[in-house]
Amino acid sequence: MTFDEFELGSNAPRVDHVQMIPPDEPHELQAQAKITWKGNPNVVFKVEGPRIYGGLSPVKLVVTDLVIVCTVKVTLSHLMKEIPLVGGVQITMTDDPSIQYGIRAKAAPGMGEMNLDSIPGLKKGLTSFLMKMLRNSLVFPQAIKKVIAKDHTPQTVRAIEDALEVSPVGKLHVTVRGAKGLKNTEFMGTSDPYASVGLGTRRTPPEDKKCQKTHTIMNTLRRVLSHTGPHTTPSAW
């Protein structure tokens, strides 16, 4: 699955609610806003594979009625007494956004209409793709960072760039003590449980590669999981 066309359209987002929040650092202002964007995009995915029309021709999928709802934090950083007053701006989403959309198939010339349900995992795959794209660019700790006072001294510009960086504020130490009420997911025998711990949003669990795992307890649903090794975290956020 690849992008064939990508245009976000002309509709502007709507700001539903704005509130000031305590700043993380001195000499800055922070505001948080709920944003709703009902877009008119032209986003087309090209999907191809051995199961689609016998692998002879790719199918183009058009994303329609795209709606994104998110909470955005805007930081006006390195406030100054002289023009332009604001040294830089940082914009980030505080959590994974809510995404709703429709899908319409554009079959290749000469091909009949296609039932989208015949493509296994299509909706889940598209949602995961869009969410990953936003998470890797906009969801905290990722952010859009823009230096406004570019004409000031190199020392000032460097200080602004440092202020716009998202840096760790501490470390989280986790010890897994145990587990109970585990369900058996094996057809024969019992499961081999382990615990996976990672930092992520409430709505979407973090990716496995960003998690830390305990050792596996083989063939049991009763024994207590324990992990007394080094306390490590996938990230220090």
Image (cartoon, helix red, strand yellow):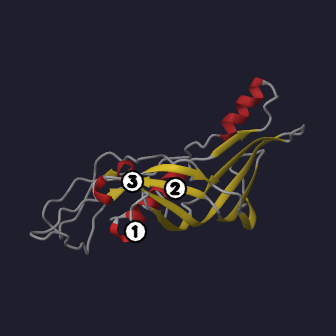
Outermost left residue: 188
Res 184 → quadrant:
bottom left
The correct choice, above or below, for 236 with respect to 67 in the image is above
Front label number (3 vs 2): 3
Local secondary structure at mark 1: helix
Amino acid on which the number 1 mark rests in the picture = Leu
Front label number (3 vs 1): 3
Residue under circle 1? Answer: 116
- Local packing at callout 1 (Cα closer than 10 Å; few below 14, some 14-19, many 20+) is some
Residue pictured at 48% horizontal, 47% vertical: 171
Give the x, y percent position of residue 83. 89, 38
Give the x, y percent position of residue 69. 61, 66
20 or 83, nearer to the observer = 83
Res 165 → quadrant:
top right
> Between marks 3 and 1, how big is the CA–CA gap?
13 Å
Q: Are marks 3 and 2 in contact (CB under 8 Å)?
A: no
Residue pictured at 59% horizontal, 57% vertical: 42
> Between marks 3 and 2, how big is the CA–CA gap?
12 Å
Residue under circle 3? Answer: 58
Give the x, y percent position of residue 221. 18, 70
> Between marks 1 and 2, how big is the CA–CA gap?
15 Å
Outermost front residue: 110
Query: Relative to residue 85, is residue 75 drawn left or right?
Result: left
Residue pictured at 77% horizontal, 29% vertical: 156
Local secondary structure at mark 3: loop
125 or 207, nearer to the observer = 125
Amino acid on which the number 3 mark rests in the picture = Pro
Query: Relative to residue 91, is residue 135 drawn left or right?
Result: left
Using the rendered image of the protein, determine whether residue 203 is visible from the camera's viewpoint.
no
150 or 54, nearer to the observer = 54
Amino acid on which the number 2 mark rests in the picture = Val
141 or 28, nearer to the observer = 141
